């Protein structure tokens, strides 16, 4: 049965994936407490004036993705991707979660949405 909520999504995962997704979920909600959590596009999505990040488990890794990842500073070069907007951090173990660095990225993503609005409605550059 396909998940319909974030809780169902988390419960559908096993082992290391569930551990990473749970830790990331807690980190997002702790860092941006005003964020709205939703299950959209088959993944947990976090919104503040539109979506700013998402969490997605894949076979060999879990991504913490950022809608506007190409637009903010990443001094530690954690973000991967080459599109014109989105970037992500890939994790294979909960020990790889760099809490402060990810919190900085989450704050930057939320701040961009506060200032520039919903990235799904913004005109493409």
Image (spheres, grey):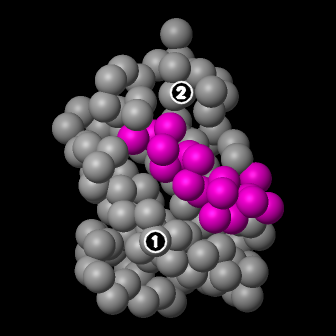
Q: Nearer the viewer, residue 26 or 36?
A: 26
SS at circle 2: helix
Q: Which residues are magenta?
A: 20-36
Number of residues whose C-alpha sits closer than 10 Å to that of mark 1, classed few (under 14), some (14–19) or many (20 or more)? few
Residue at 57 percent of width and 81 percent of height: 108
Q: Nearer the viewer, residue 124 or 7?
A: 7
Where does residue 114 sit, x and y in percent of width and height? 75, 80
- Asked if disc 2 and disc 1 are in contact, CB closer than 8 Å, the reply is no
Q: Which residue is mark 2?
A: 9
Where does residue 43 sit, x and y in percent of width and height? 52, 40
Q: Is residue 68 visible?
A: no
Residue at 64 percent of width and 83 percent of height: 112
Place residue 89 in its image quadrant.
bottom left
Q: Residue furthest top?
A: 1
Q: Nearer the viewer, residue 23 or 12?
A: 23
Q: Is residue 99 visible?
A: yes
Q: Which residue is mark 1?
A: 100
- 54 on left or right of 64: right
Place residue 79 in its image quadrant.
bottom left
Compared with 32, 2 (above or below) is above
- 94 on left or right of 11: left
Residue at 29 percent of width and 49 percent of height: 95
Where does residue 122 sit, x and y in percent of width and height? 65, 79
Residue 55 drawn in magenta: no
- 1 on left or right of 114: left
Q: Looking at the image, is mark 2 or mark 1 nearer the viewer?
A: 1
Where does residue 111 sit, x and y in percent of width and height? 67, 82
């Amino acid at each position: 049965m396909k998940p319909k909520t974030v809780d169902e999504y988390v419960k559908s995962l096993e082992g290391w994936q569930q551990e990473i997704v749970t830790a990331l979920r807690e980190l997002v909600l702790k860092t941006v407490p005003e964020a709205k959590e939703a299950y959209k596009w088959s993944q947990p999505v976090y919104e503040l004036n539109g979506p700013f990040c998402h969490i997605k488990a894949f076979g060999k890794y879990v991504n913490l993705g950022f809608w506007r990842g190409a637009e903010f500073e990443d001094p530690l070069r954690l973000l991967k991707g080459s599109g014109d907007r989105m970037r992500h951090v890939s994790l294979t173990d909960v020990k790889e979660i760099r809490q402060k660095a990810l919190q900085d990225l989450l704050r930057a993503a939320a701040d961009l949405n506060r200032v520039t609005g919903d990235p799904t409605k913004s005109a493409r550059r």
